[in-house]
Image (spheres, helix red, strand yellow):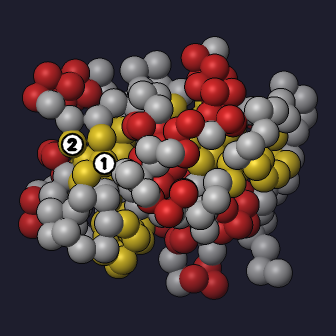
Amino acid sequence: MSNQIKIGVVVFPGSNCDQDMVDALSIYENVNVFKLWHKSEDLNNADLIVLPGGFSYGDYLRSGAIARFSPIMKSVIDFAARGGFVFGVCNGFQILCESNLLPGALLHNNNHQFICKNTFIKAEGNATPITQSLKANKAYKIPIAHGEGRFYADEETLKQLNANQQIIFRYCSEEGEVGSTFNPNGAAENIAGVCNATKNVFGMMPHPERAANSLLGNTDGKEIIESLLKNLFGDLVERSAMIETHS
């Protein structure tokens, strides 16, 4: 790797959080963020691939079901198989599940309505790069915006996710209490995010990029993004000034 981290944000027809993600990642020195069009198969030597939120292909069939067959996804799947780092948020999480890069599926919310509001999530331990630097008992206020965010996996898969420390976030109260009362969509075991067994692919339904700037009145998401970057690319990010811009 060079002395610069290269992060590619994939843009599908219907992506609408790509620029938010670019902005949230671009505040760090030594980080070069660029967009990748879904029809390209070239990842431009990226060190990290991000699949942003939105409504790829209008969410026809199922959320993420068509995007999974975009030309770039073959390259993303191959990249992940070689140990490359991939991060998906909301629709990006759905695409990762449809691509079998992450276990489980995202089903319609249990109230069958689109939900857009702030929720609280709690890191499930510190066994993954995205959670390693987060406070163990802190409830992070992160927005959600989805109609199909209910994480589902069969009993055996849930057992494996727990045993392998692949659950990265659970929905909780403002005080950090995990329970169905604070679960906005009916997700199994209050799961808000998971990773793969080798812990190089990460997905979450809440949007950290929407809570990553003080102008938004919330920087809890910035802590999640920084935990991921620092623990994947430690030295490079540690040397950066971490200066937040307001332009």
Question: Observer-nearest residue: 169 or 43?
Answer: 43
Mark 1 or 2, nearer chain start = 1
- Position of the C terminus by quadrant: bottom right
SS of the residue under disc 2: strand
Q: Which residue is mark 1?
A: 106
Q: Residue at x 31, y 74 (%)?
A: 115
Instruction: Give the number of marks.
Output: 2
Q: Residue at x 60, y 68 (%)?
A: 16
Query: Mark 1: which amino acid?
Result: Leu
Q: Quadrant of residue 46?
A: top right
| Neighbour tally class for label 1: few under 14, some 14-19, many 20 plus, Cα within 10 Å | many
Q: Which residue is mark 2?
A: 152
Q: Residue at x 59, y 64 (%)?
A: 14
Q: Quadrant of residue 137?
A: bottom left
Compared with residue 28, is residue 201 higher up or lower down, i.e. above or below? above
Could you tell whether 240 is left or right of 69 in the image? right
Query: Mark 2: which amino acid?
Result: Tyr
Q: Which residue is outermost to the right?
A: 3
SS of the residue under disc 1: strand
Q: Is residue 81 visible?
A: yes
Q: Position of residue 226 (x, y in %)?
A: 61, 51
Residues at circles 1 and 2 in contact by the CB criterion of under 8 Å: yes
| Neighbour tally class for label 2: few under 14, some 14-19, many 20 plus, Cα within 10 Å | some
